[in-house]
Structure formats: C-alpha cells, structure tokens
Image: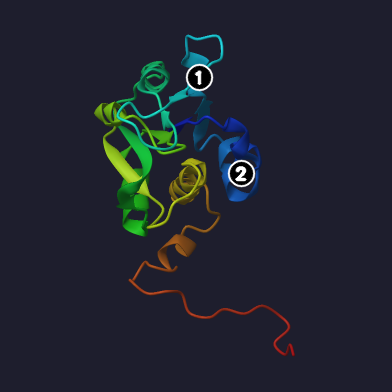
C-alpha cells in the first residue's frame, strides 16, 4: 500500500517511520510512505504555504495552491482515497482502519495546520478523518495514528495473524487483563 502524506513538517515522521513494526513493515516493503511538503510547490521566494483568512479572523490558513499542486504531483493508483486530517472528520476507529487497509492501494493524507486549510481543498478530498473531539497544532500526529493503525493490518506486518483477530475492539470490547512473568510481583 502506498501512503502519500502532505505535510508542512516532514521531519516529524522520521522516528515514527523507522521504529517498531511500522519501520519493519516499511523495510519489508509491505507499505511505502512518501512525504510531500506543500512548500516545495509554492511560487513565491519565501515559500509561503499559508495566508490570513480572506474574510478576516484570527490565525492562518493553509493556502489551496500548494496543496493542490502537491496532490496533483502524485501518481494516482486505481483504489485511492484522499484524506484530510480534520477535527470535523470521521473519528478513527477499528472498522475505519480495516476499511482503509482492505479497500485501498493508495492513501493520500493531507495534514492541516494552523486554523486549517482553505475550504477549496475539500474539492480534492474524498474523506475527512479526525483523531477525536479535541484540537492539536496540526494533522501530523493524527496521520501517524492512521498510518500505524492501517499498516499493522496489512498482511506480513504482524508476526502472528491470529493476534489481529483476538484484540481490543474486535468483539466490541476491550481486551482482558494480561500479565508477564514473574507470577508474583509486589
């Protein structure tokens, strides 16, 4: 599966992409992650990817031009979803992760920042996704959660496939308590 992550802060992903099961899955080419910085698609000398809201208001919005150019520069695989990480999106849950892992060859994930993105960016988007009902500084952390949750469901990522069948939320409940050795501890 191919992930194209459109982010103003690609360095945020360095550790995540090289650690744990996700790092191993990428090394085994179970998934591919391509980081795309919309600043690389700006046309001004300062590489500005944000601007003040046109109608007034506080904060800054990500401009549509660099986002459109970044997304349009990507190859388009047949089963593609373009996701905007957004507070008003569908909350990430296990059924959503299963749907994305099982039905798509390419996930393009746009990480919003500041006060969000220019509303016209929604013309590119096929789905908005949220980590929950709270605000973060940007879409990078939620996109990492989405990436991790989807990749772990791809064949070959988890060593024992059975472990994906008997885990939290598979039957609508949390996992039972689990322990390691020693049997007696404090």
* Residue mark closest to the camera, 2 vs 1: 1
List x then y, in percent, for residue 58: 41, 38
In which quadrant will I find the N terminus? top left
Which residue was labeled with disc 2?
16
Disc 2 is placed on an element classified as helix
Between the residue at mark 2 and the residue at mark 1, the CA separation in whole angstroms equals 26 Å
In which quadrant will I find the C terminus? bottom right
| Lateral position of residue 155 relative to residue 20, left or right | left
Dot 1, crowdedness within 10 Å: few (<14), some or many (≥20)?
some
Which residue was labeled with disc 1?
48
Please name the residue shown 41% across and 19% down the image.
Answer: 74
Q: Is residue 68 above or below residue 23?
A: above
Dot 2, crowdedness within 10 Å: few (<14), some or many (≥20)?
some
Please name the residue shown 36% across and 29% down the image.
Answer: 53
List x then y, in percent, for residue 89: 31, 47
Front in this rendered view, residue 157 or 33: 33
| Lateral position of residue 50 relative to residue 126, left or right | right
Disc 1 is placed on an element classified as loop
List x then y, in percent, for residue 18: 65, 40
Q: Is residue 116 above or below residue 91?
A: above
Answer whether residue 154 is visible to the viewer in this image.
no
Please name the residue shown 52% across and 46% down the image.
Answer: 141
Which label is found at residue 170? none
Answer whether residue 116 is visible to the viewer in this image.
yes
């Amino acid at each position: 599966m191919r992930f194209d992550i459109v982010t103003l802060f690609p360095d945020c992903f360095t550790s995540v992409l090289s650690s744990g099961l996700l790092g191993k899955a990428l090394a085994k080419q179970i998934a591919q992650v391509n980081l795309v910085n919309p600043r690389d698609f700006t046309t001004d000398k300062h590489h500005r990817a944000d601007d003040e809201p046109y109608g007034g208001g506080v904060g800054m919005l990500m401009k549509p031009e660099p986002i459109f150019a970044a997304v349009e520069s990507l190859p388009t695989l047949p089963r593609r979803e373009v996701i905007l990480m957004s507070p008003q999106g569908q909350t990430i849950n296990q059924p959503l992760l299963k749907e994305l892992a099982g039905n798509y060859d390419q996930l393009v994930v746009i990480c919003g920042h500041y006060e969000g993105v220019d509303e016209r960016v929604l013309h590119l988007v096929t789905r908005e996704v949220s980590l929950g009902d709270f605000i973060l500084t940007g879409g990078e952390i939620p996109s990492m959660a989405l990436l991790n949750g989807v990749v772990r469901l791809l064949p070959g990522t988890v060593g024992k496939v059975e472990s994906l069948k008997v885990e939290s939320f598979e039957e609508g409940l949390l996992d039972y308590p689990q322990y390691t050795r020693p049997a007696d501890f404090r």
